[in-house]
Amino acid sequence: MGMTPVELLNFTLQTCLQSLLFALVLFRGLYRRLPFFSAYATVAFVNIALAIIVYTHFGFHTVPAYYFNLWASAVQISARSLAVAELCYDGLRAYRGIWAFTFRFLLALTAIFLIHGVIDAYNQKSHLFTFAVTIESDAGIASVAILIALLLVRHYYGLQMEQLQRQLAIGLCFLCLMEAVGDSVFQRFLVRYAVHPPWSTWIFQVHDVWSFIRTWAVFVALGIWCFALRRPLEARAPAPVLLPAEAYNQLSPEINYRLRMLNERLLGMMKP
Amino acid sequence: MTDIVLGLLALLVVALLLVSLLRPRRERSRPGQSLCDFPVEDLLPRNLQYFAQVRRALSAEDAQYLHDRASRPVARRALGVRRAVVRGFLAGLLEDFQRLERLGRAIAALSPVISRKQEFERLWLGVRFRLVYAVVQFYLAFGLVSVPQLEALTNQVGSLARRLHEAMAALSAASAAAQNSHVSV
């Protein structure tokens, strides 16, 4: 069974954008700076190439194509998660103290979402498609949460992101957010209505809307990343010159002591 | 239906948060700078130097003069102006507190090792100060804040500023020396 004209158009557009991103990643040498993001772009490109072969040989709305898409999505989500982790590391590693402090926090956050995802998906194990949508949704939510945590830490310590990092983060945030929301909504429909066949026709309409949202979220993300790589990569900012450890040990407690005294004094102004 | 509405609201909140965090900030220092590139004047309190004028504006003698010589509407208007002056000064003190906080964060950002306890404590102190500050603003609206209390608060900020100015000058010199030796290697 073949694609409809709209599906064919979407697939063609995605193939072009994915190929363009892969070419830009190679041409700009992004793999030297961000190897995991480059690997994610490569995985996505390879998936598209394999999809062309699978759809040509087996058809689009077929069982082999269905299982291929499930496994391709699983590999792509794993690669994307590593790209998110790399963005966290790349942005903060020059600030050794902040990174050591933040790394544990991000790791704990990842563990919480991972456990939640496993439990959530385990509850949907009876139906493979719902299981896959649940995993994808939880992975998207985890990625968004980790990126927000990273951005909050950078904002709090006044650390500006490099232009390239910011644009890649925007694309990842947008893609993960749209996938998480779309998958969460669709998963609820599946859990409530789809496990009791026969499926009514409206569930397919919901599926079409969900596919449309996912597809266009991918287009927007790919467009952002291609735009980020349109020019040669800028030279990296020099690493910050760190202070001796004694400076922090000496000043931080004193600053905190004074801030505490200010708090007490301000609190005292409320007393009669 | 409620789930979808709540989901869309959550999406909106997250989207707004991401937009505000991902927007480039021109006024922030670029990554890769050393402590000697931080303008010290931007990190130390500035507004506490105006306390003398505020004290004069709130003095009991001024209040008595208004009570004796001015009509009730004029006295009431003057009282409103005095409270506005104090509100402005308190806003300046908040700004000074925020500068000290930023200084603490700048030092933490450029340190090879930081303490979780110190960082969480500073975070909590900042949150608490802002909450209490909001309440003090409310008290001020009803004239429940006195000059001696304001003066004590100003002295606290001032003494910290002097101590930190000396430390920052020493650290800037050490940082510049380290940067020069880093470049020459």
Image (cartoon, coloured by chain):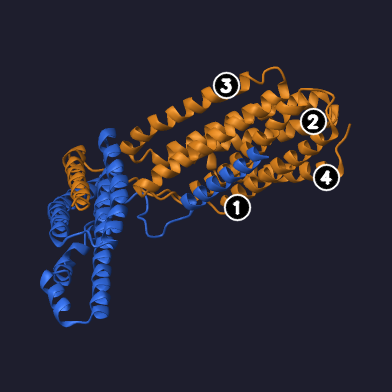
Chain colours: A orange, B blue
| Distance (Cα) linking label 3 and label 4 | 35 Å
Side of A189 relative to B25 (left or right) = right
Judged by depth in the image, the label closer to the viewer, 3 or 2, is 3
Location of residue B180 with respect to B111 vertically, above or below: below
Side of A21 relative to A267 (left or right) = right
The local crowd at label 3, few if under 14, some if 14 to 19, many if 20 or more residues have their Cα within 10 Å, is: some
Q: Is disc 4 in the same subunit as disc 1?
A: yes
Disc number placed over residue A227 in the picture, else none = 1
Q: Is disc 4 in the same subunit as disc 2?
A: yes
Of callouts 3 and 2, the N-terminal one:
2
Q: Residue A127's image quarter?
A: top right
| Residue type of the residue flagged with mark 1 | Phe
Location of residue A69 with respect to A173 vertically, above or below: above
Looking at the rendered structure, the secondary structure element under dot 1 is: helix
Figure disc tally? 4
Q: Is disc 1 in the same subunit as disc 2?
A: yes
Disc number placed over residue A53 in the picture, else none = 2
Host chain of mark 3: A
Q: Which residue is mark 3?
A: A118
